[in-house]
Image (cartoon, coloured by chain):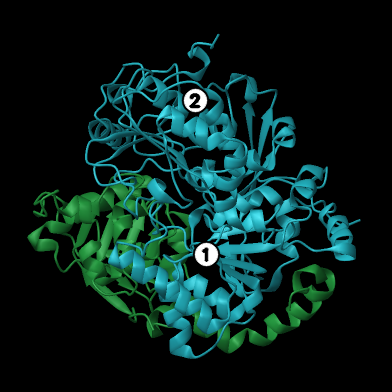
Amino acid sequence: MSEPLVHVASQAISLPDPNVDTDIIFPARFLLKIDRDGMADCLFHDRRFDADGVERKDFPFNKADRQAAKFLVAGPGFGCGSSREQAVWALTDWGIRVVIAPDFGDIFSGNAAKNGLLLIRLDKERVAELAIKAERGAIFSADIPGRSFTVDNEEICRLDMNDEAAEAFMEGWEEIDIILNREREHVAAFEAVHRTRQPWLFAES
Amino acid sequence: MSKPRTLYEKLWDSHVVRYLTDETALLYVDRHLLHEVSTPQSFVALDKRGCGVHRPAANLAVPDHAIPTRHRDQPIADPQARAQTARLVENVERYGIPFIPLNDIRQGIVHVMGPEQGFTLPGTTLACGDSHTSTHGAFGTLAFGVGASECGIVMAAQALVQRKARTMAVRIEGTLSPGVSAKDVALAFIAKVGINGAAGYAIEYLGPVVRGFSMEARMTLCNMAIEAGARVALVAPDDITFDWLKGRPMVPKGDLWDQAVSYWRSLPSDEAAVFDREVTLDAGGIAPHVTWGTSPEDTIAIDGMVPDPETIEDEQRRARLSRALDYMGLLPGRPIAGTPVDMVFIGSCTNGRLVDLEAAAEIVKGRKVAPHVQALVVPGSGLVKQAAEEKGLDRIFIDAGFEWREAGCSMCVAMNDDRLKPGQRCASTSNRNFEGRQGRGGRTHLLSPAMAAAAAITGTITDIRKLEVRS
């Protein structure tokens, strides 16, 4: 189960750089870990720490007054590149629950949805305004039942999700369970037909 | 008459289990490739639920990412990589998943090994926990990269929830000039649309250049679609595809082969099919390309100049360019050709196949690697290595001063001991020049195998077309 997300409010971190790829979010050498412990320590590792392991004070994730931030305002193309789900695990393990950006890497988006990380897409100008508000310490708030996203109590947009997606966030459901519980018979029925259409794919079994 | 459809639409339609919303469907996944790095947590999800693997024979596993490319007769030295590789072995044994071990001649990068074994077939859906899974689209396979959760889902349920992509036709018209390869076309395309410019799209490459390409060149082209943001890239299967596949270990045999080919011939996009977006590239106008920055979109022709951020209006973009130049240790407005390199890497799922090694060897033959350069050739699979050795390519590389390694991802992802040191500059045939991609602080210039070979010889980034012709 992923951590349920119902209502969340906090200050936000602003990281406006475009094309922040998943290698930056989670450097490849840490992919050698075979479990999901200590993910937050690896988040933006080579930006948060210099080569000697000393924290870079100017990096947004290192600011003392943002250590409890649950929102990230990012630039375009956030999460492009490698499919590593660790990029999402590291963000959520650090405490981020919502990322706002003009657009996201496709695979990153898919991974986010499976781990209760809410992505909000807004046009570039809107995101730039929110980045300024984030810098100023505005309070960002997302409410799944009400489908609202506000900054300093001003509604920015409605959250675009159907009831099922909302429920998955609120209950922390994992997609694997939804599919196993609900879709197995559909898959079996499809497979029976598929087997007659492309029999060569089943020759081995 | 039914509505004309694109190749992507045919592949999609033939795998929809059922629509969940207007845009998303549960999609049946025929095949799943596994490697050691993206699956340990997927198996934990299966273990926890006790749900088993739906169809073990639909899967194929191989270690490639974290494994060393030297000393294969010894246990893996890095304890984490050793543990991760051992975990893959335990997992596939427990679930009865077909597996190619490290010291098997067939071992190699998932995207080299899969096609080589005929595991990749036209008309199928294929998933793998690696973004370069788009490579398999070269066969007319709907193939896409997924995260660890989806690797678990596909093993447990044989299906994934997917959003239907929009379609993009990329037409490559005209004829390529000498010295220009599929890698240069891929880089030119990324430079044209940008790193996330094809996000949400399934690309189909069309036109005379692609029809004339070998399967290897088509794979190179599809491989890098993800660097333009597209999870899926496709080339329609044709006789080149069928000839390449025929007789490979896992392809259908006998009558089933004939049935399959006849079905595969129905897959190409219908004449009247409409794409959501069309992009055209003039092949004749494409020079050998090289990246100068920290994103694959930071690509210029080899005779071009490193861009000047001061000329960029958009503030964020200007800041990113400045940061990239700073990271890369380059000055704006200077020619990229002539930039000295410390390392040359020839390999990866982009350019680690036999034709790639042949293209590089042709340049290297009878020449020597520049004294200050360390140069590696890492074949994409054990079978590529063997075939290259049968042709004597290993001697050409070794005599020139290259290191001739065992197959794996190696310095493309720098998870083993093949890594750049901070500040080192590498001419690389891989697919990503992200900050730290080839090792923390390392500087990557992406280019074709022939261009990488030329850089090894001259010790600088070099226009292959200007390399002296040997007497």
The numbered mark at residue B62 is: 1
> What's the residue type where badge 2 is placed?
Val
Q: Indicate the position of residue B410 as horizontal and vertical percent values.
A: 40, 50
Q: Which is more N-terminal, label 1 or label 2?
A: 1
Going 14% across and 62% down the picture, which residue do you hit?
Answer: A66
Q: How crowded is mark 1: few (under 14 residues within 10 Å), some or many (20 or more)?
A: many
Residue annotated with mark 2? B364
Apparent side of residue A193 relative to residue B19 in the rendered image (left or right):
right
Nearer to us of marks 2 and 1 is: 2
B321 relative to A103, above or below? above
Apparent side of residue B422 relative to residue B415 in the rendered image (left or right):
left
The chain holding disc 2 is: B
Going 29% across and 70% down the picture, which residue do you hit?
Answer: A92
Secondary structure under tag 2 reads helix
In depth, the one of B107 and A153 nearer the eye is B107
Q: In which quarter of the image is residue A151?
A: bottom left
The numbered mark at residue A101 is: none
Check the rendered structure and report the hue given to chain B. cyan
Q: Indicate the position of residue B213 as horizontal and vertical percent values.
A: 69, 35
Q: Quadrant location of the C terminus of chain B?
A: top right
Say if residue A95 shows up in the picture.
no
Check the rendered structure and report the hue given to chain A. green
Apparent side of residue B2 relative to residue B81 in the rendered image (left or right):
right
Q: Quadrant location of the N terminus of chain B?
A: bottom right
In depth, the one of A125 and B140 nearer the eye is B140
> What's the residue type where badge 1 is placed?
Val
In depth, the one of B373 and B395 nearer the eye is B395
Say if residue B71 shows up in the picture.
yes
